[in-house]
Image (cartoon, rainbow, N blue to C red):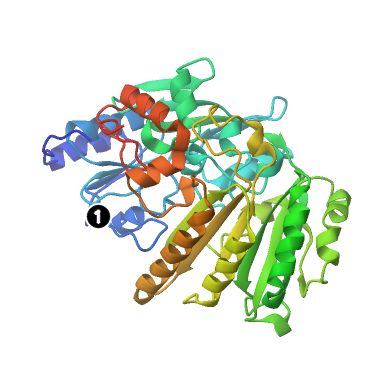
Amino acid sequence: MDAAVPHPVTEQQVSRLRSALRLPVTTPGEADYAGQSRVWNAMINRQPSLIATCTDAAEVQTAVRFAREHQLEAAVRCGGHSLPGFGTSDGGMVISLAGLKDISVDPASRRVRVGGGCLLGEIDQHTQEFGLAVPSGVVSHTGIGGLALGGGVGLLMRRYGLTIDHLISAEVVTADGNLLHASADDNTGLFWALRGGGGNFGIVTGFEFQAQEVRRDVLALLLAWPLEQVHEVFERYLDFAADAPRELTSLIFLFNVPRSDPYPEAMHGAPAVGVAGMWCGDIPDGLAAVLPLREYGPPSIDLSGPRPFLFMQSMSDEEYPWGRRYYMKTGLMEALPRAAVDLSVEAFANAPHPALEIDFHHLGGAIGDVAGSATAFAHRTAQFAYDLPTSWDNSVDDQSMIEWTKRTAQALDAYVPGGSYLNVEADTGPEVSRRGWGENWQRLVAVKRQYDPTNFFHLNPNIDPARG
């Protein structure tokens, strides 16, 4: 951000901005301000000076130039899902992409164009009409912008890789208000940085993706055993994962069984170790492939079976709704040793809330087909990611939940050689950013200096061009 003192914004200047945009410019005190300034994580409560909702790239250019002219801290909002609340700013200007919703699918070429304000569920609905999908995340009300620019993991990642691996081109409004086309042929350095470098380089108003064929019905996997069997289950799962087909993306996790259907009443509230995931190939092949896991034990819970792909893509919506309080940590691991399992079991036993869980996602597969230097997402050789998806409802629990998550993450980081997935990182700061980008850090600094030398776009996992 430029160092000059912010200029006060007059009603007349806001009125001129309103006349330049088709959707509202909202300021404090107006009827819809509270709803538009609210973000997904209820721990974040900031009060921007104005919220400009744009409908196309030209309006985004106008908004960027207005923020620069008046020295307003610019927060870019797509879906509002940033854990640290990067989509809002105290006293700044929110540039909302909620009006950039165009989606077009060419089934012949499998190319998909989406506006920068689209949500994942909206894209899934359009692409599944043609038996296609853009690999992405699993909470349907997440915005494509934040997810894709940070990498994009999800249920198709072992078969098809990250969301950024399917990005063909992007339309980008840069910090000086210019509109650029980035692809393998145009602004190639910027295109490299957009694929995993976050929102540091501009506002993406339009994405072009290469979609993949994905069946409308897939195989869901959900198994669970009593926690007493945790080490046997982990050993069995790790043996299975070592040779698992790429069609299966899965995780193993510690949790307390929910006290609701469809979980069997005898297991309600019981601590357990679970295996969940999705098979995206032929369902009979998937049933045969996961048979070693289903026959082991056998599991006390087995809710596996065919499900619509759209169901799987929105299955986590209720678990991660708007209005909860979130603090999450993650780390990328080359292996999952017994010692990490032991400390996880101990941490889980001391969790301050029964809804907390500890997840280990199986990576590898197509993610590793891309070199770590080919995109800004560097950590392609990681085989697992620990994930602490901590969420709760009451502010009185803030301290205990955050402290438990931090303490558990610090212990698990002993088995992280370096690297994290910044889309699932609640903390901010230079060390967090450096860890996230690893060996690609200096190259990202160079791109940042070229396209945003004043750090105008700094509400993100930030690359400070002045520090390097």
User: Does residue 224 sit above or below 265 in this rendering?
Assistant: above
Where in the figure is residue 283, as x and y percent of width and height? 84, 51
Q: Is residue 67 left or right of residue 260?
A: left
Q: Quadrant of the N terminus?
A: top left
Q: Secondary structure at mark 1?
A: loop
Q: Position of residue 80 (x, y in %)?
A: 41, 50
Write the residue at 25% across / 31% down.
466
- Would you say 61 lies left or right of 130 here? left
Q: Is residue 218 visible?
A: yes
Neighbour class for label 1 at 10 Å: few (<14), some, many (≥20)? many
Q: Where's the C terminus, which quadrant?
A: top left
In this view, the residue farthest toward the top is 185
Name above or below for residue 419 compared with residue 176.
below
Task: Name which quarter of the figure residue 236 lies in.
Answer: bottom right
Seen at 30% across and 39% down, the residue is: 458
Residue where numbered disc 1 is placed: 47
Is residue 290 left or right of 423 when viewed as pictured? right
**Foreground residue among 181 and 384:** 384
